[in-house]
Amino acid sequence: MAANATWFTDSRHVSIQNSQFTSTQTTIIRSPDLEPALHILHRNRALEACHTLKTAANAAKCKPGTRVKAIEDITAWADDLPDDPDTPIESVLWLSGPAGAGKTCILRTVACIYHEKGGLAGAYFFSTRVPGLDNEAPFVATIASHLIKVIPALKHPILQAIQSDPIIFEQSLEYQVENLISKLVASIPTEPPAPRILIIDGFDECRDPQQRANLLGVIHRLVTPPHSFRIILASRPEFDIRTAFHQPPLNSVTKILHLESYETSGEIYQYLADEFARIRDTHPAKQSIPSQWPGKATLGTLTIKSSGMWALRRLSSTLIIHVVILLSFSITSWTPRRMHRPGGRLQGSMPSMK
C-alpha cells in the first residue's frame, strides 16, 4: 500500500522502504453510568439493620462462655452440607424463643463468625425501636447492598437491573427478589463457593402479619434450588410465624431450635457472680462490702428465681434481678443506712422474689 502523505504532515527527511501500512479504527464502548442506580439502592436500604454498623458494636452480645451449645448447634447446621447437591436439606433454621431470651445476642455472634469466615451473604435485624426497621420495605435493598460487597460479580448486574427499573423498590417483595437476587445469583459462577448464610433477627418485630407472610414467601424463594442460601431466622413464637413453619412449603425445609429448651442455670449463676463481683469492685462503698458478697446461697436463690433468666419464664423475677443490680450499682455516694448499701438493697428485695 502506498503511503498516504497525510500521515506524515509537516514531516521532513522521512525515508520508508518496502513497508506496508494498515489503517485501523478503534471504537470505545463506555459502560453506562451506574452511579444513579447505586444512589437508588442506598436510598432504599436500611443501614441500621446491618450487623456491622456502629450501633451494632454497642448492642448486647453473648458473654464469653455463654450460649455455647446454642451457637454450636446453629453453626453445625449451617456447615452441614450434603455431598450430593440434589439431596433435600433443611435450608432454614428458625430460632424460636420468648422476648429477652438472648436471640439477638446469639445471632450477632453467629453473624460475626460467618463474616470472619467469609460465608455471610447478608444480615437484617428488624426492630420496633429503630425507625424504619419494623416493616418489609428496606429488606431486599439491604440484602442486595450486602451481596454486591461480598460477591463482587453481582455488583454490575444488580445495579444494571436497578438502572433499567428505577422504581423497582416500589414493586412487590417477590418482584424485587426475583429481579435483583434470584435471577442474578443463579447466573454467576459458583466457584469458589459464594457466601450463602443469611441472618434475619427480630422477625416478629416486623409489625404487620401480612408483611411477615410476604417475607416468609421470599425466604422460601431464596432457599429453593438452584439457590444455595441457608437462612437463620430468630423470632418470638407468634401464632402466624409458628403456623407458617409447621405447614407447607416451609415445614419441609425448616429446622426448629427452641431456645428455652437449653439448660442455662450454670451460665446464669456465673453471669450473676460476675456482675456482683463488678459491683463489689466498682461501688463507691466497696470497702464496706464483704469480699464474698452476696454469697453462694443468695446466688443460687437468684438463679432459681430467674427460672433461666435468658429464657424469661418468669419475667417479673428477671426484672427484679436487673433492678437490684442497677440500684446497687447506681449509688454514687456513701450513706450509713443499711438499705442504701448494695447488701441491704439486695437482701431487702429477696422477700419479694417468691
Image (cartoon, rainbow, N blue to C red):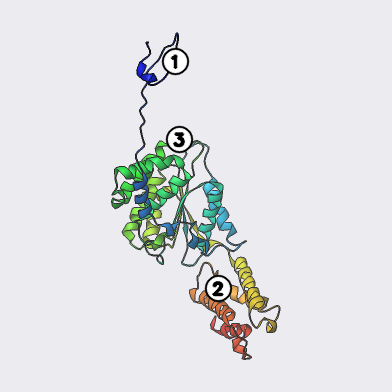
Compared across the picture, whether 306 is left or right of 19 comes to: right
In front of the other: 166 or 127 = 166
- SS at mark 3? loop
Q: Residue at x 29, y 47 (%)?
A: 166
* Disc assigned to residue 189: 3
Q: CA distance from mark 2 to mark 3?
A: 51 Å
* Three-letter amino acid code at the position of disc 2: Ser
Q: Residue at x 61, y 84 (%)?
A: 347
The x, y position of residue 46, in whole percent, is 40, 57
The x, y position of residue 55, in whole percent, is 48, 63
| Mark 3 closeness class: few <14, some 14–19, many ≥20 residues within 10 Å | few
Instruction: Identify residue for label 1.
Output: 14
* Three-letter amino acid code at the position of disc 1: Val
* Disc assigned to residue 24: none
The x, y position of residue 145, in whole percent, is 41, 49
Q: CA distance from mark 1 to mark 2?
A: 97 Å
Q: Residue at x 30, y 48 (%)?
A: 168
Instruction: Identify residue for label 2.
Output: 306
Compared across the picture, whether 301 is left or right of 27 comes to: right
| Mark 1 closeness class: few <14, some 14–19, many ≥20 residues within 10 Å | few
- SS at mark 1? loop
